Image (cartoon, helix red, strand yellow):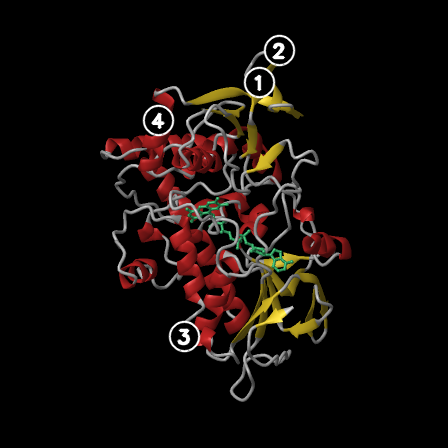
């Protein structure tokens, strides 16, 4: 395990005038881990953070490690500050780098990754006694009366006062025969008469189509999902103001849908679009999700999730324009159907699929199949989370979407008690909060975790 300079002064002592502040171990150095670290270091000058990450660069994780300039953020730059109490932080960083800092821009994810990596290269993170980066994998966590003990892949262990799981998205295991290439792998160079089948029609598919077009690929691109729904595009917005008193927390899904439609009509009546209603609801989504009983959450997952995703996670207008142009000239086609099997074939792959609302299946041939069906991994695909579930340090949520997490971010143990030493942030806490994958949501969670863990405030 490579280690950045700085003494290892693990201790279990809490903050106090004569004692060092809490020592927090952050597991995972993607966006969530970096946001958690930054908020902790800013909250308490005596706090110490050890951040564990196997990738060479911190901050990039899955979303921001793409080298492709045309893979854009799907949130405007003005709402991408990493810091909850400094909304202009990202715009100021862009300006400092001599880049266009207009708040309505959709910046490339690669540039955003540089911003996140920079976040811990200044201020308190530069003091080795405050921040230490461990280049490795955390293989185990166990609580004892003195603190929480982390084991690493090189066999060493470390004691901390608190640990935060920021292990992010669990990627699905690739197919054994590699007939379908994961969307996260680079696209191989293809002959100009090749054809590509993309499974999935969401934002990851949009990235793949843009990468193919940028590479000069002139062959046919087919994208397939059950209903062939494309993410909607961003448009200018007219903010709609909502307060907690306006939100029907705990109402059944049917009533929530009616409420959302009436908000969209209200927005349109004021000269805006349904987007203004979606944006107004966004700050309350985590509370709405927590107020739903499991049966209503399950109803949303069955009937509402896809519709929610295409309206909530929108693509930049420039990406939409390129996609529609490729569609208009016949290079890009959307198909509706369920892919049942993909087999390797002499000239690439063959896929058997059932067209939407048809009984008979059909077959497609392509040179390459790409899996862009999103992040369908299970928590147990992460050996660390599997171990926590196995030893009872964590438990599944009722619907078995992921870990059961308390409202304040604490991990709930198998016996139903909330751990005072282990918390979760970002997508790893998705089962509990649902909308906890985008930066505007994660930075709020990071700020409240820092207040609770470091300053001991009830959140
Ligand atoms: C393709 C894509 C595009 C997105 N675009 C946007 C956008 O435009 N705007 C927006 O707001 N949000 C966007 N998001 C959402 C978003 O910002 C991510 O969800 C966010 O990056 C989550 O970061 P993370 O650190 O939790 O997870 P990850 O990026 O998955 O990082 C987790 C890290 O933990 C490490 N790790 C895992 N297990 C261990 C272990 N046992 N020990 C040590 N380290 C470990 C991994 O190596 C990894 O680096 C996008 C997401 C994706 C996938």
Which label sits in the foreground, 1 or 2?
1
Q: Which residue is mark 4?
A: 324
Residue placed most toward the observer, 240 or 108: 108
Label drawn at residue 364:
1
How far apart in space, not on screen, are marks 2 and 3 (Cα)?
62 Å
Q: Quadrant of residue 211?
A: top left
Secondary element under disc 1, as helix, strand or loop, is strand
Q: Is residue 58 left or right of residue 377?
A: left
Residue at figure coordinates x 54%, y 16% from the top left: 356
Q: Disc 3 versus disc 1: distance between alpha carbons? A: 55 Å
Residue 426 in percent (x, y) is at 53, 53
Closer to the camera in the image, 129 or 295: 129
Image height of 358 relative to 129, above or below: above
* Mark 4 vs 1, N-terminal side: 4
Q: Which mark is residue 359?
A: 2
The residue labelled by disc 3 is 123
Spatial CA distance of label 4 from label 1 is 23 Å
The residue located at (27%, 51%) in the rendering is 103
Spatial separation of the CA atoms under disc 4 and disc 2: 30 Å
Asked whether residue 256 is in view, the answer is no
């Amino acid at each position: 395990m490579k280690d950045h300079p700085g003494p290892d002064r693990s201790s279990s002592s809490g903050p106090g005038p004569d004692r060092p502040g809490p020592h927090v171990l952050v597991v995972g150095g993607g966006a969530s881990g970096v946001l958690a670290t930054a908020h902790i270091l800013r909250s308490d000058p005596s706090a110490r953070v050890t951040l564990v990450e196997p990738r060479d660069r911190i901050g990039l994780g899955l979303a921001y490690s793409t080298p492709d300039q045309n893979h854009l953020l799907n949130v405007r730059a003005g709402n991408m500050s990493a810091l909850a109490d400094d909304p202009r932080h990202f715009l100021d960083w862009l300006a400092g780098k001599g880049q266009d800092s207009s708040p309505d821009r959709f910046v490339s994810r690669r540039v955003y990754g540089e911003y996140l990596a920079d976040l811990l290269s200044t201020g308190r993170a530069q003091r080795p006694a405050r921040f230490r980066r461990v280049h490795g994998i955390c293989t185990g966590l166990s609580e004892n009366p003195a603190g929480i003990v982390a084991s690493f892949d090189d066999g060493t262990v470390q004691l901390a006062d608190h640990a935060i799981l920021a292990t992010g998205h669990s990627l699905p295991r690739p197919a054994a025969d590699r007939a379908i290439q994961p969307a996260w792998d680079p696209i191989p160079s293809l002959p100009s008469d090749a054809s590509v089948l993309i499974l999935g029609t969401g934002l990851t598919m949009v990235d793949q189509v843009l990468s193919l077009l940028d590479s000069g690929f002139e062959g046919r691109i087919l994208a397939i999902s059950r209903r062939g729904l494309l993410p909607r595009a961003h448009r200018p917005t007219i903010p709609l103001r909502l307060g907690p008193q306006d939100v029907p927390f705990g109402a059944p899904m049917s009533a929530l849908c009616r409420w959302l439609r009436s908000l969209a009509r209200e927005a349109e009546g004021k000269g805006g679009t349904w987007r203004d209603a979606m944006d107004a609801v966004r700050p309350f989504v985590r509370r709405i999700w927590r107020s739903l009983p499991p049966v209503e959450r399950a109803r949303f997952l069955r009937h509402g999730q896809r519709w929610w995703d295409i309206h909530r996670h929108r693509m930049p207008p420039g990406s939409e324009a390129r996609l529609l142009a490729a569609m208009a000239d016949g290079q890009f086609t959307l198909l509706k159907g369920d892919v049942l099997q993909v087999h390797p074939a002499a000239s690439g792959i063959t896929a058997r699929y059932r067209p939407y609302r048809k009984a008979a299946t059909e077959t497609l041939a392509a040179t390459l199949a790409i899996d862009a069906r999103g992040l369908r991994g299970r928590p147990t695909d992460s050996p660390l989370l599997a171990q926590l579930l196995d030893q009872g340090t964590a438990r599944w949520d009722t619907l078995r979407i992921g870990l059961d997490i308390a409202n304040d971010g604490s991990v709930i143990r198998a016996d139903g008690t909330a751990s005072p030493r282990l918390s979760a942030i970002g997508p790893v806490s998705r089962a509990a909060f649902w909308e906890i994958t985008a930066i505007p949501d994660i930075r709020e969670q990071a700020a409240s975790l820092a207040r609770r863990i470091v300053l001991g405030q009830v959140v």
